[in-house]
Amino acid sequence: MYLETKQLTKKFGGLVAVNNVDFSIEKGKINAIIGPNGAGKSTFFNLISGFHPPTFGQVIFKGTDITTLPANQIAKLGISRTFQTTNLFEQATVLDNVMVGHRLRTESNLFDAIFRTKRLQREDKQCRDKAMEVLTFVGLQNITHKMITNISQEEKKRVAFALALATDPEIIFLDEPAAGVNPDETEGLAELMQKMVDYGLTVCLIEHKMQMVMKLAQKIMVLNYGEKIAEGTPDEIKNNEAVIKAYLGG
Ligand code: ADP
Ligand code: MG
């Protein structure tokens, strides 16, 4: 088993946001989590990536229990994520946004910064090279100097992908990667996710655009009121009674 949750549960006061969810993510594939608003999808990501401690249950990554690890340590193990709302520095360039995001994870300290040590200079170069590498991967190599405020919504999504890729993850969680972009641009983002998998990464995405999920994902889990109500291939999900009911409100 690659990455697995066991009875994963999160309560916020009396609200059970994620309820007893057993799920396993398939390595080297596109996995997807779907479900109505408020179903617990983002919370599920927050539990796996260490942003919230679960109330109950476990997260196992390659045989290791990572349930109680803090977010930065989980990131170091190769688990990366994007957020539903992308917080970029609007008045900084594409390149600077990725470099700053990456630098937050490097080893330099205040001493290095004040005395511009060799280590810092080396890290600066590594940081820039890495940022250029991931920006090229996501297709933004020609607009690295543009301000975030001057680029499109779809390009911002690509910057968010680049940020998540800069830590050299092996698995990447994307929270509604195509929200707020038009159908043509959605197609481009779908191709980019496919490229990540072709490159050897494992992808897990949350998505509302059903057509995109059905076309892209190999394995889908459906959450409703925090509970897993179905999982399987796109064909299995399409024909699942409980899923049809949840979506049609029957
Ligand atoms: P989804 O991503 O599927 O739309 P969320 O995981 O964001 O759903 O939310 C699931 C439920 O948990 C919602 O009812 C939401 O209001 C609640 N919730 C999410 N985060 C918090 C939080 N930090 N504190 C309290 N309630 C939260
Ligand atoms: Mg959400």
Image: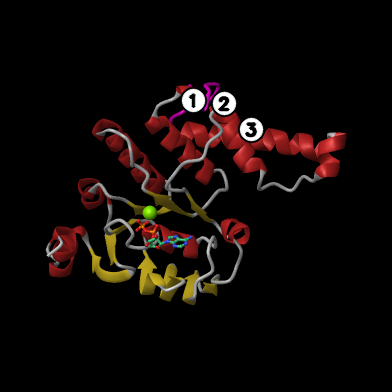
SS under mark 2: loop
Instruction: For the C terminus, give its image quadrant.
Output: bottom left
The coloring applied to the image is secondary structure
Principal SS element in the magenta part? loop
Label 1 and label 3: CA atoms lie apart by: 21 Å
The residue under label 3 is which amino acid type?
Answer: Arg
- Name the residue tied to disc 1: 149
Residue at 36% x, 70% y is: 23
Residue 128, disc = 3
x then y, percent, for residue 221: 29, 64
Q: Earlier in the sequence, mark 1 or mark 3?
A: 3
Residue 91, disc = 2
The residue under label 1 is which amino acid type?
Answer: Thr
Q: Is residue 135 left or right of residue 232?
A: right
**Residue 192 occupies which quadrant of the picture?**
top left
Residue at 60% x, 41% y is: 101
x then y, percent, for residue 110: 82, 43
First to last magenta residue range: 139-148
* Badge 3 density bin: few <14, some 14–19, many ≥20, Cα 10 Å: some
Asked if the residue at tag 3 contacts the one at tag 1, i.e. Cβ–Cβ closer than 8 Å, the answer is no
SS under mark 1: helix
Asked if the residue at tag 2 contacts the one at tag 3, i.e. Cβ–Cβ closer than 8 Å, the answer is no
Q: Is residue 228 left or right of residue 150?
A: left
